[in-house]
Image (cartoon, helix red, strand yellow):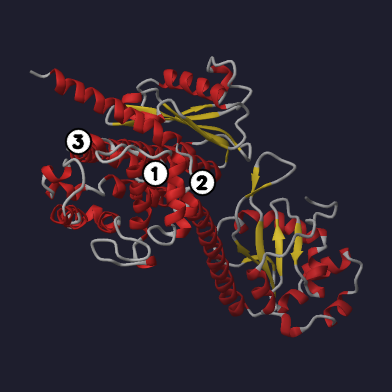
Amino acid sequence: MSTQTGQLERPKPAGRLHERVESLGVPLVWVEPEGAVAPLGECRWLERVVIASQPFAAAVRQAWPALSAGSSEAVPIWPGLWLVPMPTERRRRASSDRFQSRLMAALLTAPEFLDSDQFRLVCSAQQLDAQAARSRVDPAALYTDAEVRRLAHTLVWMQQDSMEIARRNGELQSMSRQLGDSYEELSLLYKLSTGMTVNQPPAQYLTEACRELQEVGGFRWMALQLVDDPDRLHKLTGSVFASGPVGCEGDALRQIGRQLMTQVGDNTGPRIIDDTTTVGIPELPALSRQLLVVPLVREHKFFGVLIGGDKLDDTHISSVDAKLCNSLAIGLTIFLENAMLYEDMQAMFMGTLHALTNSIDAKDSYTHGHSERVALVSRQLARAAGLPEETCERVYISALVHDVGKIGVPEAVLTKPGHLTSEEFALIKMHPEIGAHILRDIRQMQDLIPGVLYHHERWSGGGYPTGVAGEQIPLFGRLICLADSFDAMSSNRTYRQALTLEQVLHEIRRCAGTQFDPVLAELFVKLDFTEFFKMIEHHQSIAAGHAQQRGNTP
């Protein structure tokens, strides 16, 4: 803004370049086309007198075309007085819609200026005595013609270098911001991809994915709605996962998600909805003004939609947000597909184990379902002991195959009514080692072998096949020993009827510290056996049906 004297209001210093030029004793000024001039920093007395005069402003206005031409040459304003233009960025003036060039320039003075008519004109305009004014000037602050030319080029080069450094710093800052954003996005994708283990609970992973994406993307809330497809998604069918204050309950959000899936259809790309009132879902505008909808599609299979509502900073949802969410959606579809394949594989694996153990138990109608019941109770006891859920599941499988070694025991011995001879009992005692031998070459079942090999050991020693005692017996073996003995006492056998629950628990308390781990025995007697006895009834009814079929067979 110009003052009434044709000068600019004093601007702020121009940073590092100004400091360096000022240290050389070179005065800098801001200049505008209409001749307004203002010192940039501190000026000597002579420069202040010149800048403050109207004649100088008129001369600058006349010299403006040369000053703004972009040359690195010094522009003579008066004899012995030059302005060296130093180009700066174009700036918009507050009082006008047009762009104006505002130049920074070095003001250089030579001795001949002090003898010029223009110097006397300036002094007259400022009501100064020219002779007295001349005596106040420091000769060391004046430049020769040759020095002016050299200094002009040097100053312009310094300014160009300064502008290039500023430009590159700006680019570096912009790149740093982009790298920061990219780092957060890559960190999110890396974290979710490394956490994409198929044996973790899928619901836990999908909930965490929504939370991470909500935070990194800056959304107010994020939700994932899966399609209704029980054959493909099993327990996850129709599920909805959310993070952040959505503003409605699960069933209402699920209904909105289903309507959005209907609208998305077979579209494989993200959709940004700038105004949710145009979507035709009455409940949606109350939850969000803007919406990002990303379909989860892989190989033409539709899994659901990822939904993001409004940005926390009230900015518009952008294509960058859509790209990030789409990248995550691809990862989620891969996870869902793998998780379902894993569940199918697990179901097939467990079905094979159940079929194997049932075929072994079926050799003796009195032990029908024995392995399944031992597995059930062993897992209950493992949970009561505070073991991790993954370990409890491994205990279950180990207990399910704990009698697999009976494949190598003659059926006549297994099904013999009454007591066994010592030779026959010796054959029975071989089944833990046979079972361990069967499993030893299956890498995925190595951790199950201790339960198979040691489930007939005794806490006080003297069990079989090794006779180890106390905590030398592996934990899986101690757990399954209790469950195996419990089922044996609770089931009908050829040589006796099943004991009552009270009798069985009394026997377990009595044998704690001799046959059984005393700590596990104390936990065992507190278990809920409702499911166990339901399973016994079920297995007995199946065994009775088989017996009836055999009786009707001619």
Q: Which of the 4 quarters of the picture holds residue 347? A: top left
Neighbourhood count class around disc 2 (C-alpha, 10 Å): few under 14, some 14–19, many 20 upward? few
Q: Position of residue 257 (x, y in %)?
A: 49, 24
Q: Residue furthest left?
A: 554
Q: Position of residue 118 (x, y in %)?
A: 78, 67
Q: Amino acid at mark 2?
A: Lys
In this view, 346 is above or below 22: above
Q: Which residue is mark 2?
A: 526
Label 3 and label 1: CA atoms lie apart by 20 Å
Report the front residue among 276 and 381: 381
Can you tell which mark lies on residue 166? Answer: none
Q: Position of residue 404 (x, y in %)?
A: 20, 47
Label 3 and label 2: CA atoms lie apart by 30 Å
Q: Could one spot residue 532 in this view of the protein? A: yes
Secondary structure at numbered mark 1: helix
Instruction: Decide which of tag 3 and tag 1 comes sooner along the chain.
Output: 3
Instruction: Decide which of tag 3 and tag 2 comes sooner along the chain.
Output: 3
Can you tell which mark lies on residue 362? Answer: 3
Residue drawn at x 64%, y 80% as measured from the top left: 144
Label 2 and label 1: CA atoms lie apart by 12 Å
Secondary structure at numbered mark 3: loop
Q: Which of the 4 quarters of the picture holds residue 366? A: top left
Q: Which residue is mark 1?
A: 377
Residue drawn at x 29%, y 50% as measured from the top left: 398
Report the front residue among 347 and 331: 347
Judge from the rendering whether residue 85 lies leftward or rightward of residue 350; answer left or right.
Answer: right
